[in-house]
Amino acid sequence: MTPDAVNFSALPQECDFVALDFETANREWTSICAIGLAFVVGGQVVANPSWLVRPPQLVFDPGFVKIHGITADQVADKPEFCELWPELRPYLEGRIIIAHNAEFDVNVLIQALDLYNIPRPSAEYSCTKVIAQRTWPGWKRYGLAALAERHGILFRHHDAGEDANVCAQVALRACREKGAADFGALHETLNITRGRIYPDGHDKLREGAVTLPAFGPWEGRIHSRPEQVKRQQRANEIEDATIDPASATGVINGYAVTLADCACADFKGRKLPCKHIYKLFFELNKGR
């Protein structure tokens, strides 16, 4: 979609949050070649515009072209980011922005603004990869394509508009999964502090301790210890797992595991849940 095909006045003046996706021409943060947005109002995507953008230099890495399919010829007559920004700014200023792998998109935005000596807006932001990891622990993959497949969303990956739309859909599904009344409540439930962009700086998103319930003989507060959070994260990387839901047991990485015991050296030495016990817990609680 070209910029002159977008009726900016038709975009929502207020929204719950807006999903953002950038595509770049090469490894330079500032080489924006496409922008996609998805506006969410009342739990639905109500607008999903996208733009092709001419980067500061028409240097397209063949590997990047292979990923998103955008070429120098396609954007040669398109506006640069600095030309689009005056129209875009009102729809990002003061909003909650979300993106998948948000630190990438936020850094692209910041560095593009700095390149053109444009003041940064004030906005909060969040990341649907972090949200997904905390909403559906135990899944093996949290890339946008993998999440779309999990949720039955068909899309063309690395199209800026479609990526922004899927990002928004993942956030909405997370709200429903956690019974969150709004996006703010979701962050409270998941113990995520949104990041901030403002004219003088950038505060990164912060993840608090994951709150897991008590299970087996373990009190819930045990799971919030930093060393236990690391074991929960490593549990998500395990692929060798055979689970018996009826008996709530498993064989994981070759070790016999219950919710109270594991044959591995880590558990024998510490007598606290190891990554195998967490893997069993996550597998038994999938979909709950």
Image (tube, grey):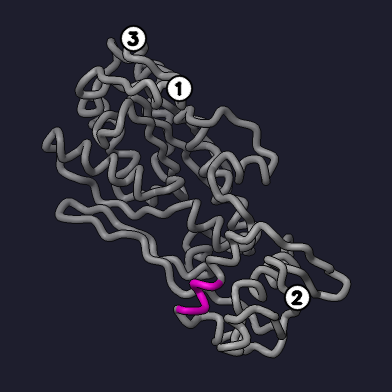
Residue 92 image position (x, y, % from top left): 33, 42
Q: What kind of element bears circle 1?
A: helix
Q: Looking at the rendered structure, which numbered label has been put on residue 73? A: 3
Q: Residue 155, can we see it?
A: yes
Q: Which residue is mark 2?
A: 256
Residue sitting at x 67%, y 46% = 150
- The part of the chain drawn in magenta is 227-231
User: The residue under label 1 is which amino acid type?
Assistant: Lys
Q: Quadrant of residue 261?
A: bottom right
Q: Which of pointers 3 and 1 indicates the residue nearer the eye?
A: 1
Q: Which residue occupies the foreground of this view, 225 or 182?
A: 225
Callout 1 environment at 10 Å: few (<14), some (14 to 19), or many (20+)? few
Q: What kind of element bears circle 3?
A: helix
Disc on the earlier residue, 3 or 1: 1
Q: Quadrant of residue 77?
A: top left
Residue 163 image position (x, y, % from top left): 50, 35
